[in-house]
Image (spheres, rainbow, N blue to C red):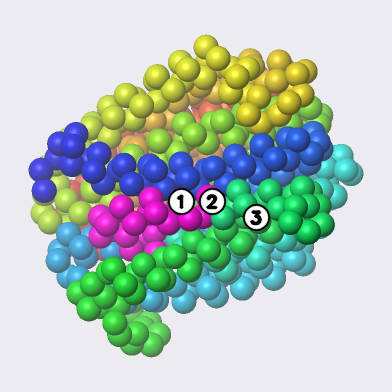
């Protein structure tokens, strides 16, 4: 495979569309709850990031499986892919049972310990108690994503995401506001709607795979039972990505908890800006995921000399998309923010934070793409250590600026600059100096 702007775009475009569709789920929740109240809006931010932090355990595991699937795809060992998929799915379903049980038992205690406002605490718990049912569906869904991205069949993700978003909009509208004879459930309705949308996503993946994928080619026609060797192989790669992704999103939860200590208004602003930022972040992650998968495929095919070129192209295309978007958001901030709330004071107060957030992507783009490239080389432990270094710097900055200095909410968003600059420098240094070209996994 030649590395060109077109070849990278062909793979990245379906991932980008699918991720944008999925981000519409969070955006829908925010837009609907912004019309319920500021407390519900802020609570959904904390509860949503809490859910995401746990979800990232499963997503991190799937990234490790995706790297292995991509490597076997590059080596043309297609029959092994099916067993990686099945063993990974079993592990993730067991993980879903554990996380569901622990969340139901300990969420109330954890939230009461970290959230000051009792009303925010109560609303967040309502959301989480229903949202955790989604673990069973989302953890299964990420293994399907790993399969389709790892084998570069990314067009499937677009259709799947469309099904999930449309389902979420329908379920949320009906359950949050009480339409079609259903009671108005408010924030609990948002959680139930999102979980049901994830169920629809998994059903789509199953039906599509049975009907449209060459299951014999990829060894999906035979389930060979539990295979300790394959499970160990997956865990050797995935364990570090699981821990890394969980810790990474946990620090994002830490950021929201810190902002909540500044008041309910700053928390509501932060949720709105997070939702807008998710659009920019989606573009970044789409090309970062594409880059990581291509890096693994090229190394598996013995073409590690193409790694630098694919990294450069992914960064350039990301900037081509994000710079115009960032300018648009900055020039018309109130128009964008009004999508999420009709409270004029809240709209006006959110504008400075939006401006600060947009500038962070000059650093977050190369930072995330370089980081996924390090993961794609198979040096997962190194990627984990680089992430831990970045997180230490990030947490120290959040603690000092928010808890100690109690800066304005707009300045709080400079934490994203700190994260992007640190991970960018660390990963660039490793790819320049490290020995990764012939890494076997």
Up/down of 244 relative to 229, above or below: above
Residue 289 point in image, percent of width and height: 35, 46
Q: Which residue is mark 3?
A: 171
Residue 90 point in image, percent of width and height: 46, 76
Residue 256 point in image, percent of width and height: 69, 37
Residue 72 visible in the shown view: yes
Query: Pointer 2 and pointer 1: residues touching (CB < 8 Å)?
Result: yes
Q: Residues within 10 Å of mark 3 (few under 14, many from 20)?
A: many
Seen in the image, is 330 located left or right of residue 151? right
Q: Secondary structure at mark 2?
A: helix
User: Going from the N terminus, do you reach mark 3 or mark 1 first?
Assistant: 1
Q: Residues within 10 Å of mark 1 (few under 14, many from 20)?
A: some
Which residue ends up furthest to the front in the rendered image?
180
Task: Find out whether residue 189 is within the magenta segment.
Answer: no
Seen in the image, is 38 located left or right of residue 214? right
Q: Which residue is mark 2?
A: 166
Highlighted range, magenta? 143-166
Up/down of 98 relative to 221, above or below: above
Q: Which residue is mark 1?
A: 162
The CA distance from mark 3 to mark 1 is 14 Å
Residue 50 point in image, percent of width and height: 66, 50
């Amino acid at each position: 495979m030649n590395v060109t702007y077109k070849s990278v775009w062909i793979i990245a475009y379906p991932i980008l569309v699918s991720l944008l569709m999925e981000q519409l789920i969070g955006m829908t929740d925010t837009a609907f709850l912004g019309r319920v109240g500021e407390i519900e809006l802020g609570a959904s931010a904390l509860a949503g990031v809490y859910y995401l932090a746990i979800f990232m355990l499963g997503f991190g595991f799937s990234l490790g499986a995706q790297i292995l699937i991509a490597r076997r795809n590059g080596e043309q060992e297609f029959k092994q892919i099916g067993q990686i998929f099945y063993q990974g799915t079993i592990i993730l379903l067991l993980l879903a049972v554990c996380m569901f049980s622990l969340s139901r038992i300990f969420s109330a205690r954890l939230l009461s310990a970290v959230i000051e406002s009792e009303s925010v605490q109560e609303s967040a718990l309502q959301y989480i108690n229903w949202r955790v049912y989604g673990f069973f569906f989302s953890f299964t869904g990420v293994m399907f994503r790993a399969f389709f991205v790892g084998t570069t069949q990314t067009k499937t993700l677009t259709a799947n995401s469309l099904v999930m978003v449309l389902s979420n909009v329908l379920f949320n509208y009906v359950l949050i506001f009480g339409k079609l004879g259903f009671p108005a459930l408010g924030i609990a309705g948002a959680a139930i709607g999102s979980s049901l949308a994830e169920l629809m996503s998994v059903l789509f993946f199953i039906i599509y795979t049975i009907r449209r994928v060459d299951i014999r080619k990829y060894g999906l026609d035979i389930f060979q039972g539990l295979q300790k060797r394959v499970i160990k192989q997956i865990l050797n790669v995935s364990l570090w990505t699981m821990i890394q992704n969980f810790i990474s999103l946990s620090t994002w939860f830490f950021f929201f908890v810190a902002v909540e200590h500044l008041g309910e208004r700053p928390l509501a602003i932060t949720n709105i800006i997070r939702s807008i930022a998710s659009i920019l972040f989606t573009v970044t992650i789409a090309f970062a995921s594409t880059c990581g998968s291509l890096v693994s495929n090229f190394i598996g095919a013995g073409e590690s000399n193409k790694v630098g070129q694919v990294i450069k192209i992914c960064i350039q295309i990301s900037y081509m998309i994000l710079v115009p978007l960032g300018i648009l958001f900055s020039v018309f901030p109130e128009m964008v923010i009004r999508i999420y709330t009709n409270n004029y004071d809240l709209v006006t107060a959110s504008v400075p934070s939006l401006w600060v957030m947009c500038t962070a992507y000059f650093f977050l783009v190369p930072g995330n793409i370089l980081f996924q490239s390090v993961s794609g080389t198979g040096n997962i432990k190194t990627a984990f250590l680089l992430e831990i270094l970045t997180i230490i710097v990030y947490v120290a900055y959040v603690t000092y600026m928010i808890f100690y200095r109690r800066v304005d909410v707009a300045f709080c968003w400079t934490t994203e600059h700190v994260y992007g600059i640190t991970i960018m420098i660390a990963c660039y240094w490793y790819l320049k100096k490290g020995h990764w070209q012939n890494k076997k996994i």
